[in-house]
Amino acid sequence: MADPAVDARALQNLIRRQFRLGLTAFGLLVGLLGLLPLAFTALPDPDVRPGSALVVWAVLGVAVYPALVVLGRWYVVRAERNERDAVEPERP
């Protein structure tokens, strides 16, 4: 029979690891999407150079989604690894 104190510690450790992973993923997401408006302000005015509006739409419509998929996949793999490590006891 498992010791409840050990189970509680393992659960707290899992929650802490998942929370840290969530904060890391959120930070990467903010870094990825939060800096786009700053990058877009560096582009020339669309009235002066009409092609700059195409760059904005290309980045928003094409480049952002693969990055979001990669970030999401990374998060899911790491979260599942955290859960698997919490369930399987460490071997000496």
Image (spheres, rainbow, N blue to C red):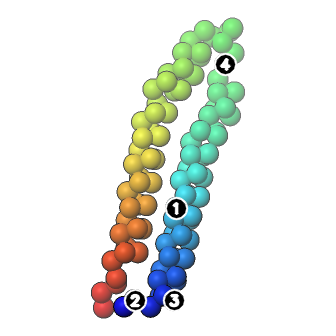
Give the distance between the C-alpha atoms of the residues marked 2 and 4, in whole angstroms.
Answer: 65 Å
Residue 78 on image: x %, y %: 41, 60
Q: Earlier in the sequence, mark 4 or mark 3?
A: 3
Give the distance between the C-alpha atoms of the residues marked 3 and 1, in whole angstroms.
Answer: 24 Å
Residue 23 picture quarter = bottom right
Pointer 2: what residue?
Answer: 2
Left or right: residue 42 versus residue 20 is right
Name the mark on residue 86: none
Residue 71 on image: x %, y %: 45, 47
Foreground residue, 27 or 9?
9
Q: Residues within 10 Å of mark 1 (few under 14, many from 20)?
A: some
Give the distance between the C-alpha atoms of the residues marked 2 and 3, in whole angstroms.
Answer: 9 Å
Pointer 1: what residue?
Answer: 21
Give the distance between the C-alpha atoms of the residues marked 4 and 1, in whole angstroms.
Answer: 37 Å
2 or 4: mark nearer the eye: 2
Pointer 4: what residue?
Answer: 44
Q: Residues within 10 Å of mark 2 (few under 14, many from 20)?
A: few
Residue at the left extreme of this rendering? 91
Name the kind of residue labelled 2 in the image. Answer: Ala
Q: How many badges with numbers are in the image?
A: 4
Name the kind of residue labelled 4 in the image. Answer: Pro
Name the kind of residue labelled 3 in the image. Answer: Ala
Foreground residue, 51 or 35?
35
Foreground residue, 29 or 43?
29
Give the distance between the C-alpha atoms of the residues marked 2 and 1, in whole angstroms.
Answer: 27 Å
**SS label for mark 1:** helix
Q: Earlier in the sequence, mark 2 or mark 1?
A: 2
Contact? badges 4 and 3 (CB < 8 Å): no
Residue 46 position (above or below residue 70): above
Q: Earlier in the sequence, mark 3 or mark 1?
A: 3
Q: Earlier in the sequence, mark 4 or mark 1?
A: 1
Residue 60 on image: x %, y %: 53, 26
